[in-house]
Amino acid sequence: MSDGKIESAVEKIRSEGRVGLMTHIVLGYPSLEESLKLVETMAGCGVDFIEIQIPFSDPTADGPVITQACQAALDGGVRVQDAFEFMEEVSGRYDLPFLFMSYFNIAFAYRQAASGGRGGADGVAGFVAASAAAGASGLILPDLPPDMVREGYKEACDSAGLHPVYVVSPNTGRERLEVIAEAGSGLLYATSRTGTTGKEMDLEMQELTGFLSNVRETCGLPIAVGFSISTREQVEALGGHADLAVVGTHFIRVWEQGGTEALEAELNKLTGA
């Protein structure tokens, strides 16, 4: 059974008639201490969800800003165990849903060396259980196809009470959406376009809303929309079509250029505070 935080947060957002905000950090960029300050700032500004990316050497769904942040975190020595310890701290401190985002190889290889070479299903089960124990409400592994029953992933999530959050894009067909509806729970992550994160562009709202309508009708899950969202107008334009806007690259850029003060101002702008 899940911790109920995703369900409660979505219910609150809907009851208030608004689009919620999910923010994104790369754990360990530029340091674990700064990551903690970023979460503190985001939670203090009233964001609804926070996505914590466990850095990986080949983040295929991410653009250059997040890819560089991942590499910097890895160069700084951040490891998977740091992610669990960080999650335990922030989930105990702030009453909102935290999700881990990473890539399937992280789960597949978990404890492989420590267990005498075992990875695979043992690794997946161990990673999922450790994520739930640390306080994560869900997992986003964008390179894991929902129609591939990989190493007991869904069963491990069900057992641990963790929501497997799948990623869909505008070129996802109805047949695949039906598979995702069976495999996923809690939330769906819909990309506003194909490609990778971080590309600045205007959202093609007519096409996007048609896609989101199809997703909602087929899957029936709350929808978070990410990729290329950076303004309050874009967040508001999702009203009636999605429950959450996901903003990652934009906030990294703002923080890099102006520090905490600039980040707070931008967070308040996007949350409508």
Image (tube, helix red, strand yellow):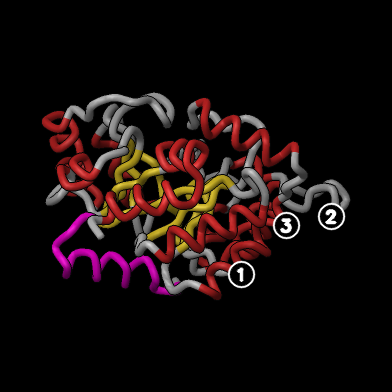
Residue 85 lies in the magenta stretch: no
**Residue 15, image x and y in percent?**
16, 70
Please, what is the three-letter code of the amino acid marked with disc 1?
Answer: Glu
Range of residues picked out in magenta: 3-19
Q: Nearer the viewer, mark 1 or mark 3?
A: 1
Q: Earlier in the sequence, mark 2 or mark 3?
A: 3
Q: Classify residue 32 by image quadrant.
A: bottom right
**On the rendered structure, is 131 left or right of 137?**
right
From the image, state whether disc 2 or disc 1 is nearer to you.
1
Residue sitting at 53 percent across and 34 percent down?
A: 66
Q: Secondary structure at mark 1?
A: helix
Residue 222 shows in the view: no
Please rate how many residues cluster around mark 2, counting C-alpha atoms within 10 Å: few if below 14, some from 14 to 19, many from 20.
Answer: few
Report x, y in % for residue 68: 60, 30
Comes first in the chain, label 2 or label 1: 1
* Secondary structure found at label 3: helix
- Which amino acid is tagged 2? Ser
Q: Residue at x 53, y 54 (%)?
A: 100
> Image quadrant for the N terminus?
bottom left
Horizontal relation, residue 35 to residue 165: left or right: right
Residue most toward the right? 116
Residue 155 can be seen in this image: yes
Residue at the disc numbered 1: 89
> Mark 2 to mark 1: distance in Å?
26 Å
Q: Secondary structure at mark 2?
A: loop
- Mark 3 sits on what residue? 81
Identify residue type, mark 3: Gln
Expressed as whole percent of the image width and height from the top left, the position of residue 161 reads: 49, 69
Q: Which residue is mark 2?
A: 115
